[in-house]
Image (cartoon, helix red, strand yellow):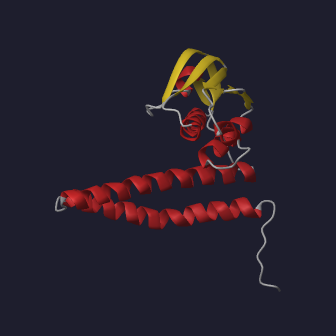
Amino acid sequence: MNGNVRTTGQEFPRLVSLACHDLRTPLATVNGFAKTLTRSGELGEREAHFVDLIEAAAGQMTGLLDLLALAARIEAGRYEPTLGEADTLELASSDDPRIEREGLGEAIETDAAAVRRSLESLARCAALHGGVPVVTWHVEGRTLTLRPIAGDAGSVVTGETPRDLGSLVGRLVIEHLGGTLALDGDRLRVAL
């Protein structure tokens, strides 16, 4: 035996799923202690700020682990969407002030939570990598158009340049649910 461990086919998604699971325990410990310190009320302003940063980072890490685990489930064929009726205009909604929406939606059956997260991830990617303060989803029934896709954001949003985990997983989810994504100049068209 040469000592090299190689993963193929279904083994790699299982390895990723296991890693995501195993990373949750130490992350929960970090988050738990940060919350305990915050509740103690004994921190100075500077220390409280540091604990807030730790909590925010732990939240971001949890979100990234969730994305990675979802991608692994899709790749392993173990993703079972929770289907329900959702309005496409509502799916394009976000609490992120960089993401706006307009238009008229349509009721569809889909995994609303996963699609909403996917659309939000695509829009955040477009704003971040395009260097624009605001992006807008224009909704026409089952077709959603995100604009502007500025600068180098197009290749990142579509996954051609893999630099954004959220947009990569968003694309996987939408395509797994039968949707499509296509770059059209300075716009990303998503058909659900």
Q: Compare residues 148 and 58 and report the one nearer the observer.
A: 148
Q: Compare residues 166 and 30 and report the one nearer the observer.
A: 166
Q: Position of residue 106 (x, y in %)?
A: 61, 16
Q: Quadrant of residue 58?
A: bottom left
Q: Is residue 40 placed above or below 78 in the rendered structure?
A: below
Q: Residue furthest top?
A: 104
Q: Which quadrant is the N terminus positioned in?
A: bottom right
Q: Residue furthest front?
A: 151
Q: Compare residues 28 and 34 and report the one nearer the observer.
A: 34
Q: Compare residues 138 and 9 and report the one nearer the observer.
A: 138
Q: Is residue 128 placed above or below 39 in the rendered structure?
A: above
Residue at 69% across / 26% down in the picture?
A: 189
> Would residue 192 be visible to someone looking at this image?
no
Residue at 68% across / 65% down in the picture?
A: 15
Q: Position of residue 135 (x, y in %)?
A: 54, 28
Q: Which quadrant is the C terminus positioned in?
A: top right
Q: Is residue 177 placed above or below 106 in the rendered structure?
A: below
Q: Position of residue 178 (x, y in %)?
A: 75, 32
- Would residue 160 appear left or right of 106 to someone viewing this image? right
